[in-house]
Amino acid sequence: MDTPRPTPSNYERLLQLAEDAFAMRSDPAQLQVDENVLQHLRQLHPATVMEESDANGPIAWVLLIPTTLELMQAFVSGRITEQQLYDRTPLGGNYTALYLCSGLVLPEHQRKGLATRMTLKAIDHMRKDHPIEALFVWTFSDAGRASAQSISKAAVLPLHERVH
């Protein structure tokens, strides 16, 4: 008789969703998100990491990286990797661009606008401290591209996309 496996937590499910969507563990060019990275991002700006939770833990995460237009252009054109974008973004900088790094929502909570609302809230917070002029993305799915376009339109900011 098989021993039943424990049900994964919301946190574990979101981590698995991230790996399934981005396969980041097998790609050193992508940002390897861990507690140190999250802490550093919060030092860039407190609104870089947004989370929505229910009684069972997190149901959605949004990760954003404020940076400069110059670094945005280097990333969008493929001259630097996502990891290099993160590494080269200065602490305490005057951020003029915002990288929509990732938005993850558990399947049962998708298609409700959660990631979009969270991202727009984060953009509003960042705009109070920085003159954000543009958004940029590196999409891995049609849903991610549609979400980024919706965010760009609602925030009234141009969207630049890195092509694979």
Image (tube, grey):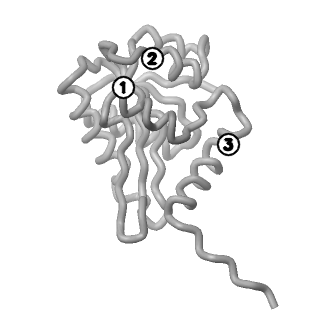
Residue in front for this viewpoint, 134 or 64: 64
Residue 9 place in picture, x, y as percent: 53, 67
Report the residue at 69% width, 40% height from top.
25
**Residue 57 to residue 24: above or below:** below
Is disc 3 placed on a helix, strand or loop?
A: loop
For badge 3, the amino acid type reads: Ala
For marks 3 and 2 on the same chain, the one whose residue lies earlier in the sequence: 3
Residue 126 position, x and y percent, is: 26, 29
Identity of the residue drawn at 62% across and 30% down: 30
Q: CA distance from mark 3 to mark 1?
A: 25 Å
The disc at residue 23 is: 3
Give left or right: position of 12 versus 3: left
128 relative to 33 in the view: left or right: left
Q: Could you tell me the amino acid type at mark 1?
A: Leu
Q: Residue furthest top?
A: 70
Residue ID for mark 1? 44
For residue 77, the mark is none
Hey, what amino acid is under mark 2? Thr
State the SS at label 1: helix
Tell which tag, 3 or 2, sits nearer the viewer: 2
What kind of element bears circle 2?
loop
Residue tagged 2:
89
**Could you tell me how far apart the alpha carbons at marks 3 and 2 are, in whole angstroms?**
23 Å
CA distance separating discs 2 and 1: 9 Å
